[in-house]
Image (cartoon, rainbow, N blue to C red):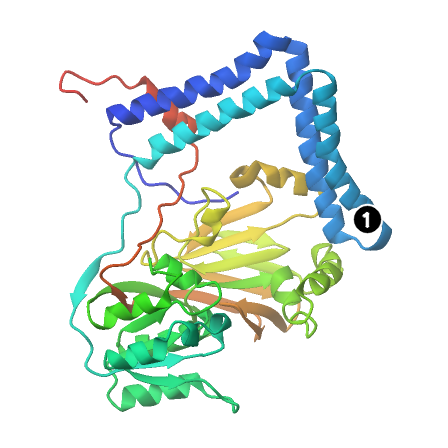
Amino acid sequence: MVTTEQEAPGRATVAQRWLARLALVAAAAAVLVPLAGIGFRQSVALVLVGMAGLALTAAGMWWALTHKGLVRGLAVAVAVLAPLVVLVLYTSRGLLWVVLVAIGLLGVAVAAGRAALARDPGPGKMPEVDAPPPKRPFLIMNPRSGGGKVGRFGLKAKAEALGAEVALLEGPEIIDVGLLARQAVANGADLLGVAGGDGTQALVAGIAAEHDVPLLVISAGTRNHFALDLGLDREDPSRCLDALADGVELRIDLGFIAGRPFVNNASFGAYAAVVQSPAYRDDKTGTTLDQLPGLLAGQSGPRLVARAGNVTVQSPQAVLVSNNQYGMGDIAGLGRRARIDRGTLGMFAVTVSSAVQAAGLLRGANSRGLTSLTSPEVVIDADTAQIPVGVDGEALVLDTPVRCTIQPAALRVRVPRDRPGVPDAKPQINWQRLRRMALTVSGPGGG
């Protein structure tokens, strides 16, 4: 795996040192308890059986995704039965208590280690500046977005009460959102806002950046990934409107793919190909299971090549290029960005060609099948003239090579002064760092 350098940690505090010591003691106890309770041979057997079960589960899932019919059925059976067989073996040999104690101690070690590392200086918050209320805000709202959040939260009436002009995308004719936003700026709008999905947010964001007017993001979409990384309230989108009266501004980056702006990410490979299917909208699960075998096994779909800086990834099954890098601390972190103002793209590529490599994904960030890096430019090429791409949830087909770039500090975003904020990402466990912290002794002045 290719990754980026981490920021140099600061001096450890007393609390950090004791948490690091607790993490190391708990991790050591997780190893020593089985040795003391059941001996060396049985401890080794216990670990090997558990690892075999995990590997078979991962391999079974890979076979299920890359095959159809009887092989898929057998693969699902392997993925389900492997952990059950391991559990039965542990129970029949009277070893289940050892496993539970060891897992509990490892949980304490990880929790204490993360608590210690979380006290290190993080990436910090994006700087914000005071901003006067806009005089002529113009908001575009999609009543169908997010299952009807615009109507459910009374967003139109609340925005108009705050002095905004609101345009509803009611149809039935197709409305050119970009043209609507451009006309609003030409008529004197000094703020553009969107209550809709991330794809619509990105389209209007590009126009706002082009004319240097602030963008107001209203979390009325389905997933609201952009709103999450801006620290907005995703449960009550009406709170986003508070920025019209008492707001601050953030300067963030804007990604571009083939000249089209994106606020979150662009996806290539298996996922992007599946969502292109006309059947995907009506049967997401069935369409995915039907098309994935050919895409993952390389029997269908274009053969991709991803280039970022001096790194080239050959034949990845999936590539995600993001406006700034997603976290890698845990599964949830893969959907979050601590900051969107570092002037760089993130690239996350998956290259798996066998069940063995699929099992290797259990190593997480250390897996050879994963590539994570940052670069100001990412180029995706293929053996076809065009490839499917998902851009902020929108299905597109683009000419190859597809060039992704970043425009630093391109977008002014108006957010409420009082907002939930961006949740802190869980840090990756770094045992070397924890060992150094644990062995640090405070000096005469207390360290």
Residue furthest toward the right?
70
Secondary element under disc 1, as helix, strand or loop, is: helix
- Residue 279, quarter of picture: bottom right
Is residue 257 visible in the rendered image? The answer is no
> Residue 251: where, in percent of width, then height?
26, 64
Give the total of numbered labels.
Answer: 1
For image coordinates 19% across by 67% down, the residue present is 246
In the drawing, does residue 304 fall left or right of residue 176?
right
Q: Nearer the viewer, residue 232 or 4?
A: 232
For image coordinates 60% across by 9% down, the residue present is 37
Q: Residues within 10 Å of mark 1 (few under 14, many from 20)?
A: some
For image coordinates 49% across by 66% down, the residue present is 222
- Residue 178, quarter of picture: bottom left
> Residue 302: where, in percent of width, then height?
67, 65
| The C terminus sits in image quarter | top left
Residue located beneath label 1 in the image? 73
| Kind of residue at disc 1 | Gly
Q: Nearer the viewer, residue 26 or 444?
A: 26
> Residue 129: where, in percent of width, then height?
18, 62
> Residue 401: where, in percent of width, then height?
55, 69
Above or below for 416 versus 134: above
Is residue 339 visible in the rendered image? The answer is yes
In the drawing, does residue 139 fall left or right of residue 380?
left
For image coordinates 36% across by 24% down, the residue present is 20
Above or below for 93 versus 254: above
Above or below for 20 versus 240: above
- Residue 263, quarter of picture: bottom left
Q: Nearer the viewer, residue 45 or 171?
A: 171
